[in-house]
Image (cartoon, helix red, strand yellow):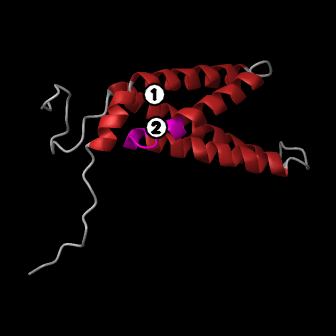
Amino acid sequence: MTDRRGGATTDAGDRPARPPLVEMAAALLIVTGAIQLLSAIGAVATGNLPPDAGGLLALTVAIDVATIAAGVLVRAGRLWLLVVNYVAVIGFLDLLRSTQSIVAVVLAVVDLAVLYVLFTNREWFDRSRREAPDEPDEAPTID
């Protein structure tokens, strides 16, 4: 099904269909956030943290949870500017760590790929926001 501008829409016709690359970007954010969160939890469970790393652990967990939330926002087509800025910051942080770990290099490349997808699909985010069904003014009643 296509809309009047030639873009694909969902079966309901109310929102434009999500491009496959946007779906991939959302999945990458969700999966990398979940893997890093599980890694942090594993480090705590095995006792591989120095005793004074509590603040750093809390920051790491917050960043990982926010990465998962960013993936959900991308999938929903919401808050494009916030997600772009967040992914750019975590990409920069991963680049800073890239001299210490090959995993950080991979994460930085993933973040750059997600940024590319977000920038090249901005039009979909704008259309998705404009064409989303409005919230009902009042709750439906049964007569």
For the residues labelled 1 and 2, the Cα–Cα distance comes to 8 Å
Q: Residue at x 50, y 26 (%)?
A: 114
Residue situated in front as seen by the camera: 36 or 87: 87
From the top left corner, tell me how far across and down residue 87 is, in percent.
Answer: 58, 32
Tell me which amino acid carries mark 2: Trp
Q: What residue is disc 2 on?
A: 80
Specify the segment rendered in magenta: 74-83
Residue situated in front as seen by the camera: 62 or 128: 128
Locate residue 69 relative to residue 50 in the image: left or right: left
Tell me which amino acid carries mark 1: Leu
Q: Secondary structure at mark 1?
A: helix
Local packing at callout 2 (Cα closer than 10 Å; few below 14, some 14-19, many 20+) is many
From the top left corner, tell me how far across and down residue 40 is, in percent.
Answer: 71, 43
Residue situated in front as seen by the camera: 60 or 140: 140
Q: Residue at x 61, y 29 (%)?
A: 88
Q: Is residue 78 above or below residue 32?
A: below
Q: Is residue 68 above or below residue 17?
A: below
Q: What residue is disc 1 on?
A: 118
Local packing at callout 1 (Cα closer than 10 Å; few below 14, some 14-19, many 20+) is many
75 magenta-colored = yes
